[in-house]
Image: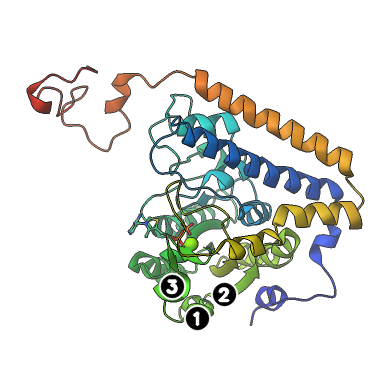
Amino acid sequence: MTKAATAAQGNSKSRLSDKLPDAKLLEWLRSMQLIREFETRTMQAYQQAKIGGFCHIYSGQEACAVGTIGCVEHDDPVVLAYRDHGHALARGMDPKACMAEMYGKAAGCAKGKGGSMHMFDKPNWLFGGHGIVGAQTPLGTGLAFAARYEWEVIGSGKKKVALCYLGDGAIDQGAFFEAMNLAALYSLPVIYIIENNGYSMGTAIHRHSANSDNLLARGEAFGITSVKIDGLDILNVYDQFKPLVDECRDMQRPAFVDFKTYRYQGHSMSDPQKYRTKDEVDQYKQKDSIANLLDHCMSVRNCIDEDGWKEMRTEIAEIVREAVQFSENAADPDPSELFTDVYANPQPNLSPTATYAHGKKNPLL
Ligand SMILES: Cc1ncc(C[n+]2csc(CCOP(=O)(O)OP(=O)(O)O)c2C)c(N)n1
Ligand SMILES: [Mg+2]
């Protein structure tokens, strides 16, 4: 077992996170609360039909995005599945650009063309949310390849680590196994983070995956360092994930993380949730990651009190309110944008359906 794997399996005596300054913990508390509040307002906007299409809420999983992104550098590349608002915000995306994207407005991070599942932010090294389950895993491997190539072959850049997030529902996709194989074979610095929230849509993990109690076996089969992390406690995430990141960066090799987490809302905005009980959800809410960190900050670090927490929440609520307001008032994309940012358009500025749609000319044109 590597040093990081040993550390990750839990060394309760000395906690790495004890050395973190209070300011860092408060920054994470703020970031997790921003995501929670943002998602609450997203649900409201969706229910008012202001947001359309698929929309997957991240509430409950905040310690994963904030904790893992908190362990890497700003220019380490990140690639995601479709439950992506939380990571985008944790990565530093402007909440206005994130919300406007869901509103389908031109000021959105993907010009309003992607929606909820396609948060993309190049300046923040965020290479997108992806709607095809597992499709981002070869991309994560490619990002690691590019980073290593740049550093080792071209001789520019520096040692980087790519973070590639996927859900438990993606672990049996063939593309993921191909991606892991190449990552191991070429020794690429990519960390596959399985956000194991226990469900793939409405199917519990033990019903969709063989040997689901031992996901680490999948990474280990390729000789990849594989660790399990309890993802509801962000300090624990840091204690376990930071040594792993450091090792992958230093040794330029991959890792696999079975990251235990839980989502509070349904799979998407339309999910009657017949597959789980309210009791189960409530039990996880008892272990809420924001409440956990707040408690630690209040009672162990004494770095925030009730008034400070109230002030922080008020400030965050205002930021999100402004993001919603901004999105409501923002301009729609110009109709000509229909024909830009596409892989190929054989008839530039002319939609193939312009004249053929039901025999009528497309009214947008
Ligand atoms: C290749 C492919 N198959 C099926 C789907 C339909 N689908 C959308 S989300 C989803 C569940 C994925 O669950 P998981 O990876 O655990 O992510 P979570 O929603 O729990 O974050 C499925 C099967 C898809 N988008 N892509
Ligand atoms: Mg899942």
Which residue matches tag 2?
Answer: 226
Residue 323 spot, x, y in % from top left: 59, 28
Query: Is 22 placed left or right of 354 in the picture?
Result: right
Query: Is 226 placed left or right of 32 in the picture?
Result: left
Q: Nearer the viewer, mark 3 or mark 1?
A: 1
Q: Is residue 268 above or below residue 215?
A: above
Q: Distance of mark 3 from mark 1, alpha carbons?
A: 17 Å
Of residues 251 and 70, the one drawn nearer to the viewer in this rendering: 70
Q: Distance of mark 2 from mark 1, alpha carbons?
A: 8 Å
Residue at image point 42% right, 74% down? 207
Query: Which image quadrant: the N terminus?
Result: bottom right
Amino acid on which disc 3 is placed: Leu
Residue 364 spot, x, y in % from top left: 24, 18
Where residue 7 sits, quadrant-wise, is: bottom right
Residue at image point 50% right, 38% down? 122
Residue 160 spot, x, y in % from top left: 58, 55
Is mark 2 in CB contact (under 8 Å) with mark 1? yes
Q: Secondary structure at mark 3?
A: helix
Residue 355 spot, x, y in % from top left: 10, 22
Query: Is 345 placed left or right of 163 in the picture?
Result: left
Q: Which mark is residue 185?
A: 3
**Badge 3 or badge 2: first in the primary sequence:** 3
Amino acid on which disc 2 is placed: Ser
Which residue matches tag 1?
Answer: 217
Amino acid on which disc 1 is placed: Ala
